[in-house]
Image: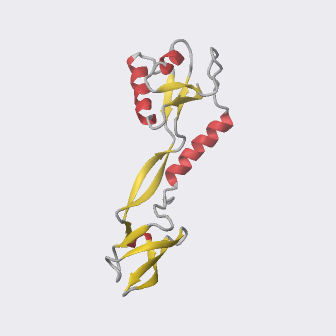
């Protein structure tokens, strides 16, 4: 059994994975396909002032398949709805398996991504208007001047009594307007 990369329609990786698994088991070819894997990573986003954990596909448009491609197996996988083909195959030729080093690196990366979950997408941009939802300036609107990723803080200009005042607020104290 070797690892192969199947090209799929981007954004439909999980659906295509399910289709492959269903079709392989329906045709009784489970002994030839050991594993179907969509490499994903956990990403924490901040929505409405709350941390939301989301699973994001790491290699968009690609699915890893550990299989022995004999007989009808490659044809069955290619014919599944949403599959474009195998990565690295020459027209009319056989699919090219991944090298052992590539597999170890990718699977190691997948394991590493499952463990590391503190990467946060910063949903704020400089010049964007936000509303303060926590602290003494609750209810005030302001404009983002600086974004500090490491400290997870924003420098915001808020108009108080007709005068612009700089504030340093955490990501959790503001929301987009």
Q: Is residue 67 left or right of residue 48?
A: right
User: Which residue is farthest left?
Assistant: 139
Relative image position of residue 55 (x, y in whole percent):
44, 48
For the point 44% across and 72% down, the residue is 143
Q: Is residue 32 left or right of residue 47?
A: right
Relative image position of residue 104 (x, y in whole percent):
63, 40
Q: Quadrant of residue 134?
A: bottom left
**Number of numbered markers:** 0
Relative image position of residue 85 (x, y in whole percent):
55, 24
Q: Quadrant of residue 23?
A: top left
User: Which residue is farthest top?
Assistant: 71
Looking at the picture, tell me which residue is in the foreground, 164 or 86.
164
Q: 134 above or below 165?
A: above
Q: How is the image coloured?
A: secondary structure
Q: 112 above or below 77?
A: below
For the point 34% across and 83% down, the residue is 136
Quarter the N terminus occupies: top right
Looking at the picture, tell me which residue is in the foreground, 105 or 75.
75
Relative image position of residue 13 (x, y in whole percent):
46, 35
Q: 119 above or below 161?
A: above
For the point 42% across and 16% down, the residue is 28
Looking at the picture, tell me which residue is in the foreground, 155 or 32.
155
Quarter the C terminus occupies: bottom left
Looking at the picture, tell me which residue is in the foreground, 128 or 22.
128
Q: Is residue 171 left or right of residue 91?
A: left
């Amino acid at each position: 059994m070797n690892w192969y990369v199947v090209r799929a329609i981007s954004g439909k990786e999980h659906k295509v994975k399910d289709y492959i698994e269903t079709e392989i088991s329906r045709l009784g070819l489970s002994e030839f396909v050991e594993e179907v894997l969509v490499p994903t990573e956990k990403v924490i986003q901040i929505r409405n002032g709350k941390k939301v954990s989301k699973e994001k596909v790491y290699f968009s448009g690609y699915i890893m398949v550990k299989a022995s491609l004999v007989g009808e197996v490659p044809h069955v996988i290619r014919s599944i709805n949403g599959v474009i083909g195998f990565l690295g195959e020459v027209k009319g030729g056989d699919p090219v398996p991944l090298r052992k080093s590539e597999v170890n690196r990718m699977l190691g990366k997948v394991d590493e991504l499952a463990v590391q979950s503190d990467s946060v997408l910063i949903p704020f941009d400089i010049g964007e208007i936000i509303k303060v939802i926590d602290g003494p300036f609750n209810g005030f609107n302001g404009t983002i001047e600086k974004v500090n990723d490491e400290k997870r803080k924003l420098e915001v200009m808020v108009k108080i009594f007709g005068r612009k005042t700089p504030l340093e607020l955490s990501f959790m104290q503001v929301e987009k307007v």
